Image (spheres, grey):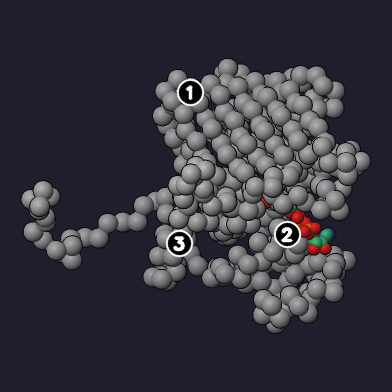
Amino acid sequence: MATIKFKEASSPYTKPSPSPPVQDTIYRKYLEDVTLKKGLGHPMVKVALFGVGRAGTIHLSNIIASPRLKLLYIVDDVESNRANMKEYWHLDDVTFLTSKQADRVYALEGKKAVLCEKPVAKDNVNTLKCYETAKNNGKPLFCAFYRRFDPSYLDLKERVRNGEIGHVHIIKTVSRDCTLPSLEYLKNSGGILHDSMVHDIDVITWILGEYPTKVSVQAYAHIPEIKAIGDYDTVAVSFCFPSGTLGMIDMSRNSVHGYDQRVEVFGPKGMITADNQRPLSVVTQIGTQGTNTSPIWYSFPSRFMNAYRRELDHFVNIALGKVESSVLPKETLAVSKIASACEESARTGETVKIQWTENELP
Ligand SMILES: NC(=O)c1ccc[n+]([C@@H]2O[C@H](COP(=O)([O-])OP(=O)(O)OC[C@H]3O[C@@H](n4cnc5c(N)ncnc54)[C@H](O)[C@@H]3O)[C@@H](O)[C@H]2O)c1
């Protein structure tokens, strides 16, 4: 009876219902679907998907689920899979091409907006060429970093930028991949620093709005097959930023306990973290041996599913000319430049200094 005095006299039906929080991006997207909200114009964008492997399948399922996209072409050299793919995804209207026939995709109108994950080339000379071609064609090239579209990472960045912990003293990411990629993939991946660590470099520099001037990297291959191809599976990086902030990345290719992805930012007013997430919320069993929680998300397609959807939606808005890309070409180029400095440091064992021109800085 102690709380009866708080009982409200009026029914909730007599009041306006509360808005869903901005953080619940999935519900807000659902609201658009259920109310058939058109927002930002609603033309259908026609799509060709290049490569349907681990990453391409994420995009394939998101394209099919989007009311804003129509898949016209799939370009992939693995022809043995086509019949199964057609049947599984009901792709009767989709034309399948090999990479040699990809001209058909370009021949229709010539110039297309392009989304690719991460820097489009390993070296900045070629990435720059791609950006220039896109610019000359008057079409966007969106080299995306999917973690920027994760609501938790975005929230963390905004809190840091709003000064909640003051000037950042230390920022660190833990980035441990699951599952271990195939050796065929790793041989063509460009190496762990350009293939994987670029995401962490981007997260750190995006949160800070600052680029490091010194990097020091220790890297090791515990897995013999990875050593044999001249790559590393375990990396520790430290960065020194001009404002005095120190950064760290702790990275592994082979995390058996799931896709371990964390960010921690520390400053004079406290600490903000983006922790691992889990598929189950009924997680804790308190027993004589302590507590038990369910596993974390197993891999990137599940942990960052919402981010991939939001990234694709952003791309559609870019392609329609409704918004500017939230990842600037110079940011992508800076990430690659930092990854190359890290590579040099890993190879030589020396601290590497990075010089920045005014145009390159954020
Ligand atoms: N950002 C991310 O979350 C993320 C995650 C994994 C992979 N990736 C990137 O995605 C790309 C593919 O990686 P994956 O793991 O899906 O590899 P994968 O080997 O699983 O799939 C690659 C697919 O592309 C096809 N392919 C190869 N060359 C092609 C060409 N010239 N034209 C059309 N198709 C071609 C292959 O037949 C294969 O089906 C890589 O660049 C990788 O770095 C990004």
Pointer 2 residue: 54
Residue at 74 percent across and 33 percent down: it is 235
- Between marks 1 and 3 in the image, the one whose residue lies nearer the viewer: 1
Task: Characterize the local packing of mark 3: few (<14), some (14-19) or many (20 or more) Cα atoms within 10 angstroms.
Answer: few
Pointer 1 residue: 267
Indicate the quadrant of ligand 1 in the picture. Answer: bottom right
Q: Relative to residue 301, is residue 26 drawn left or right?
A: left
Q: Amino acid at mark 1?
A: Gly
Q: Earlier in the sequence, mark 1 or mark 3?
A: 3
Q: Earlier in the sequence, mark 2 or mark 3?
A: 3
Q: Relative to residue 85, is residue 174 drawn left or right?
A: left
Q: Is residue 164 above or below residue 37?
A: above
Residue at 47 percent across and 47 percent down: it is 287
Measure the C-alpha gap from mark 2 to mark 3: 25 Å
Using the image as rendered, state which of residue 215 and residue 337 is in the foreground: 215
Q: Amino acid at mark 3?
A: Lys
Image x and y of residue 44, in percent: 57, 70
Image x and y of residue 152, in percent: 49, 45
